[in-house]
Image (cartoon, grey):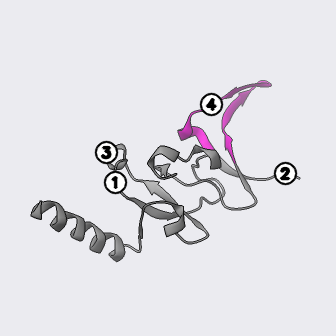
Amino acid sequence: MKTFFSTLLLLVFVAKGYGLLICDDETDCEVDECCVFEDTDQMLGKGVCRKLERPGTQCNEPDAAIKYYGSKFLFRCPCKEGLDCQPTGICRNGACDVHTTVESQRCTRVKL
């Protein structure tokens, strides 16, 4: 048990050193951040606050938060305001192959 608390304390200091804030849910983060699990082994614990995603970066849909685990996102945040998380695709000769996996989604500007 002593080792557990020592490890947890070390994690907090390392996270603060990198400017990361430990979170239980998004209310622990700033307005322009979300609470993210860095890996699947961490899902029963705390997340870290990350900035909302910028244009061209990989993203999660806003409704992809895992409510069972405190509405945290897995690996990455949704896009900043004015951006939309869209699947990317490859188009050749008028035919498009659209990938819908999380890894293929990118933040793009909302078209009005």
The residue carrying mark 3 is 41
Q: Which residue is drawn at 44% across and 48% down?
A: 69
Give the CA separation, mark 3 to mark 2.
Answer: 37 Å
Q: Viewed as shown, does residue 25 lie left or right of 85?
A: left
Give the CA separation, mark 3 to mark 4.
Answer: 26 Å
The residue carrying mark 4 is 99
Q: In this view, does 23 lie above or below 76?
A: below
The residue type indicated by label 2 comes to Lys
Q: Viewed as shown, does residue 56 lie left or right of 43?
A: right
The residue type indicated by label 1 comes to Gly
The answer to which of marks 2 and 1 sits earlier in the sequence is 1
Q: Does the magenta stretch include residue 103?
A: yes
Front in this rendered view, residue 101 or 25: 25
- Mark 2 packing: few (<14 Cα in 10 Å), some, or many (20+)? few
The residue type indicated by label 3 comes to Asp
Q: Where is residue 85 in the image (x, y as percent from the top left)?
A: 67, 47
The answer to whether residue 66 of the structure is visible from this angle is no
Q: Which residue is drawn at 76% across and 60% down?
A: 82
Give the CA separation, mark 2 to mark 1.
Answer: 38 Å
